[in-house]
Amino acid sequence: EKGGYDHFMLKEIYEQPKAINDTYRGRLLRDEAIIKMAGIEDNMKKFLNANRIIIVACGTSWHAGLVAEYIFEDLARIPVEVEYASEFRYRNPVITENDILIAISQSGETADTLAAIKLAKSKGAFVFGVCNVVGSSIARESDAGAYTHAGPEIGVASTKAFTTQITVLSLIALRLARAKGTISSSDYRHHLLELEMIPGKVEEALKSDALIKSISQVYKDSPNFLYLGRGYNFPVALEGALKLKEISYIHAEGYPAAEMKHGPIALIDENMPIVVIATKKGHYEKVVSNIQEIKSRKGKIIGIVTEGDVQVKELADHVIEVPETLEPLTPLLTTIPLQLLSYHIAVMLNKNVDQPRNLAKSVTVE
Ligand code: M6R
């Protein structure tokens, strides 16, 4: 059932090229330059007239929501707020009939997310669900939705659910951008083309597995890790840190790289490994200067870089390359090495990768 892999998590990491493909298949029609999603088409007016989109989710799904915030605002120019479902539902939020709530959940059973939906519905908001499990409670409670089609995810640490959530949310953002005219026809086509190339590029990224395993060996006994990223890759830094905490029980924190100077830089010494997402697009020069600041304090840098990178390679202790793509799609690639890093470290530490202590696959308690 693990298809020859030692753990479900590893199997699911390797399934991502197919899962992403399954997610956009039948929806992304590149020849016609069309994105076809019934849940969006049927409610296009609501989406176009919405004051704002509120995204609610927990854990990894919340990180996918943060990536979506960047892409919705950047491409479709719709204001977005991303909330932890558990905070949203308990703080008397301002919600109106002109708001759209997007709930993201792999399992579709997360109690806090379900409660947030019910609250938003009671205030008249339109609820759109992005779930993986077909027929799940959140899918049923939503007014409309889009499934991720990632296939069953067994490992407690979410992997393919995350990348397929980003895929669906990217399709939605692109569809809305096209309808609103906030993206040019040529940019739109370019995004569709690049999205179709993502599964192949994820395959490429997976080829760094052996390298990542050797890096894991060096840092597996570190008690702390920092993860840094900017822009679209800030949520990826959070996700990388969560993956490591969850399955290896190593303390890790994700930060927007520019926030380092407001506190976390005090933590840096020669014993601190820092994973920095430093792909070519998106504040590259700024991230390079963050790396210089870290190096001058002797921190150990594991850089996630674009293929062919020169600058970071000179500064970092290790670099892991991912193929180049458009900036909004980089999270689909930069996430892969972070998943593998946490996986290998957890295995080396003899942890229960698929069923980490204290955690359940779906959190149905509030
Ligand atoms: O099923 P959901 O997407 O609603 O679950 C949300 C979180 O519980 C989940 O993402 C959790 O953080 C994962 N274990 C992370 O790997």
Image (tube, rainbow, N blue to C red):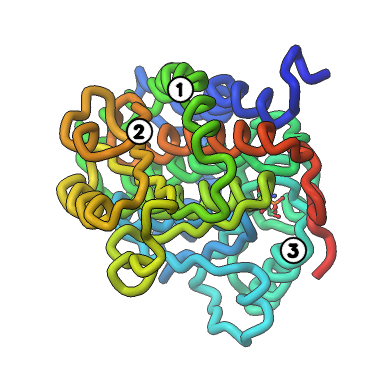
Q: Residues within 10 Å of mark 3 (few under 14, many from 20)?
A: many
User: Which residue has dot 2 on it?
Assistant: 318
Identify the mark nearer the N-term, 1 or 2.
1
Q: Is residue 268 left or right of residue 308?
A: right
Identify the mark nearer the N-term, 3 or 2.
3
Tell which of 363 and 267 is nearer to you.
Answer: 267
Displayed quadrant of residue 147: top right
Looking at the image, residue 193 lies above or below residue 248 = above
Which of the labelled discs sits on residue 211, or is there none? 1
Q: Residue furthest top?
A: 4
**Residue 214 x/y as whole percent:** 50, 25
Identify the mark nearer the N-term, 3 or 1.
3
**Residue 78 x/y as whole percent:** 36, 61
Residue at 67 percent of width and 57 percent of height? 143
Question: Can you see residue 339?
Answer: yes
Give the quarter of the figure containing the C terminus.
bottom right
Which of the labelled discs sits on residue 40, or is there none? none
Residue at 20 percent of width and 47 percent of height? 288
- Residues at marks 1 and 2, CA–CA distance in whole angstroms: 9 Å
Displayed quadrant of residue 344: top right
Residue at 22 percent of width and 37 percent of height? 312
Amino acid type of the residue that numbered disc 1 sits on in the rendered structure:
Leu
Amino acid type of the residue that numbered disc 2 sits on in the rendered structure:
His
Residue at 62 percent of width and 22 percent of height? 15
User: Which residue has dot 3 on it?
Assistant: 114
Amino acid type of the residue that numbered disc 3 sits on in the rendered structure:
Leu
